[in-house]
């Protein structure tokens, strides 16, 4: 099978950062929480939003702070120890990488003051293009849209690492 047979696209429609945060001394305090909130000024807070971001909000950036639930967290063979040991996750998305990388840098500076740490996983957003229309409809037609935190209080994060063979296949596509 060739990459073109899978109808994969190399078009990037946006960027995401997943910042897995471990707070210094084992917990966050009110002062740190307020400082983290200020980092997102000008961005849309996904905790208060419904649906996908507007074009304007996506251009500015969108953030979402999620607290880890230790009772439902396990390593499940994750290679990133800091991911499953984290106490929270800040998910960022934006049309351009710059605004969310700036947020990450400012968060790192802040966390250093509190002796905390951050493990970052980066990703790009692409249109769904590797499945047929019928499979896409089956998988996503009944999916609930993103909603505010007071309505949807739980989230699941499943980091996926692609194999070297996968990336080689993607590289071959750009040559074809």
Image (cartoon, rainbow, N blue to C red):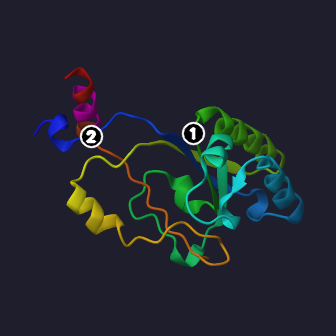
The residue at 30%/66% (across/down) is: 139
In space, the residues marked 2 and 1 are separated at their CA atoms by 20 Å
Q: From what the image shows, is residue 27 above or below residue 3?
A: below
Q: From what the image shows, is residue 72 above or below residue 57?
A: below
Secondary element at tag 2:
loop
The answer to which of 73 and 66 lies nearer the viewer is 66
Instruction: From the image, tell me which residue sits under label 2.
Output: 8
The residue at 49%/51% (across/down) is: 80
Residue found at the very far front of the displayed protein:
55
Secondary element at tag 1:
loop
Q: Which residues are magenta?
A: 167-172
Residue found at the very far top of the displayed protein:
175
Instruction: From the image, tell me which residue sits under label 1.
Output: 95
Residue found at the very far left of the displayed protein:
1
Q: From what the image shows, is residue 9 above or below residue 142?
A: above
How would you rate the neighbour count of disc 1 (Cα within 10 Å): few for under 14, some for 14-19, many for 20 or more?
Answer: many
* Magenta-colored stretch includes residue 168: yes
Main SS category, magenta section: helix
How would you rate the neighbour count of disc 2 (Cα within 10 Å): few for under 14, some for 14-19, many for 20 or more?
Answer: some
- Figure quadrant of the C terminus: top left
Asked whether residue 87 is in view, the answer is no
Asked whether residue 157 is in view, the answer is yes
Residue 2 x/y as whole percent: 13, 36
The residue at 44%/55% (across/down) is: 159
| Residue 27, quarter of the rendered image | bottom right
């Amino acid at each position: 099978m060739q990459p073109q047979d899978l109808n994969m696209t190399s078009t990037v429609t946006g960027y995401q950062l997943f910042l897995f945060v471990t707070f210094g001394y084992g917990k966050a305090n009110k002062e740190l929480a307020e400082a983290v909130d200020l980092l997102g000024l000008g961005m849309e807070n996904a905790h208060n939003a419904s649906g996908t971001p507007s074009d304007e909000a996506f251009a500015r950036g969108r953030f979402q702070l999620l607290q880890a639930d230790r009772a439902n967290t396990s390593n499940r063979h994750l290679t990133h120890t800091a991911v499953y040991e984290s106490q929270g996750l800040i998910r960022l998305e934006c049309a351009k990488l710059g605004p969310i990388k700036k947020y990450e840098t400012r968060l790192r500076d802040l966390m250093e003051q509190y002796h905390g740490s951050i493990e970052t996983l980066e990703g790009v957003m692409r249109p769904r293009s590797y499945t047929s229309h019928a499979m896409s409809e089956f998988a996503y037609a009944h999916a609930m849209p993103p909603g505010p935190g007071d309505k949807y209080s739980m989230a699941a994060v499943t980091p996926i690492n692609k194999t070297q063979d996968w990336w080689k296949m993607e590289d071959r596509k750009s040559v074809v």
